[in-house]
Image: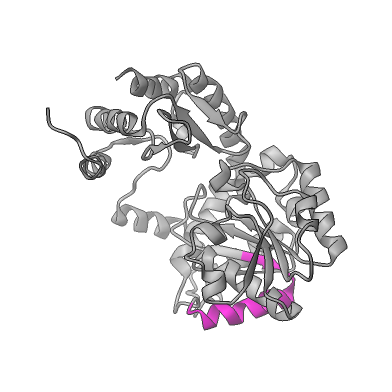
Amino acid sequence: MATTTSDDLRARRKAAADNCERWLSHRRVSVPDRLRQLAEVATDGETDSYGSGGEVAALEQEVAELLGKPAAVFLPTGVMAQQSVLRVYADRAGTGRVAVHGLSHLLVHELNALEEVHHLRIERLTSEPRQPRPDELAAIPGKLAAVTLELPLRDAGFVLPSWDELVVFAESCAERGVPLHLDGARLWESTPYLEHSLAEVAALASSVYVSFYKVLGGVSGAALAGPEDVIAEVRRWQRRLGGNLYSLFPYAVSAREGLRTVLPVMGDLHQRAVELSMALQSEGFRVFPEPPHSNSFRLYAPRAAEAIELSAVERMETTRESICGRWQPADVPGWSWVELVVSPATLEWQVDEIAKAFGELLAR
């Protein structure tokens, strides 16, 4: 019997994905169709110039209003947005020490850019798969330039603090006189669990970063909101880092469309995630967190990653349905996990239909 290698499975997954006609989380759209969509939803006939004016300016105003901040700036990437604002805080404080969770995107996915590019010194609040506590902040001595919180913390399983925990942590930062920055790449998805508005959440922090290409479905891009003087300095870093492209309007058009069409259904997405978590557990899976804190959660299966990944690829090939990404080995031997993201496309499926589809992966 021929052995299926990891490279073989990756190639088969890609080929199967290219042939899929139905998607549970991330619907594929061809480039021509995407461009036609952008043309249909554009509302401003003026083209921005190096990020000034047109749809970009309109987007910045909308984000500032949604987050209740005096100003906002659009940037092509969240990496650039967060590095820029933390550099501003460091220069102002006269220290490069920044308190960050050990599983933060800033540390896990950015090739040590905070230290290599900006010479910031990282102080880890914790590396446990949970949100940090005020006592862990208090345990870091000396002056800090900023403290960051990722809401939700993706690499811990999309976990959020409770509203009361978030308030207490923010108060701890204020008492210490250090700016709190929210890594809100998925902040849009966090408000149903926190049961407070975007502006109420953002009011706890000095600055907030949000992303547009995840569940909102934008082409790319991010925004940073905060005090006018901080945003003005971030714009200077945007220029230094090459982020003020000649024109950014395609990104802004798609971001504004996401705010108009997807943001209003965040509560529905979270509710569907909770419903799915219960249905999938009845099929023999485990979920974390239970119940989900946002529209995304980790799904655990009592199968080795290689085995269930093969089942998933075979199902894609036969049904032309994409229900999950690539399965990863879990910490428990013989178990595996995958991220499950509930998007507007997920609402087109019935809960029992989804549970049955995943149950087939264990039955194969």
Q: Position of residue 108 (x, y in %)?
A: 51, 57
Magenta stretch: includes residue 58: no
Q: Is residue 315 above or below residue 11?
A: above
Q: Position of residue 101 (x, y in %)?
A: 64, 55
Quarter containing the N terminus: top left
**Predominant SS along the magenta part:** helix
Give left or right: position of 108 versus 356.
right
Q: Position of residue 159 (x, y in %)?
A: 62, 41
**Residue 104 can be seen in this image:** yes
- The extreme right residue here reads 175
Q: Position of residue 361 (x, y in %)?
A: 34, 24
Q: Nearer the viewer, residue 197 or 242?
A: 242
**Residue 262 can be seen in this image:** no
Q: Is residue 191 above or below residue 275?
A: below
* Quarter of the view holding residue 95: bottom right
Colouring rule applied to residues = one colour
Give left or right: position of 334 versus 178.
left
* Quarter of the view holding residue 317: top left
Q: Residue at x 42, y 58 (%)?
A: 38
Q: What span is colored magenta in the figure?
A: 224-242
Magenta stretch: includes residue 240: yes
Q: How many marks?
A: 0
Q: Nearer the viewer, residue 306 or 359?
A: 306
Q: Residue at x 69, y 55 (%)?
A: 125
Give left or right: position of 244 versus 160.
left
* Quarter of the view holding residue 2: top left
Quarter containing the C terminus: top left
Q: Nearer the viewer, residue 131 or 279?
A: 131
Q: Residue at x 48, y 55 (%)?
A: 213
- The extreme left residue here reads 1
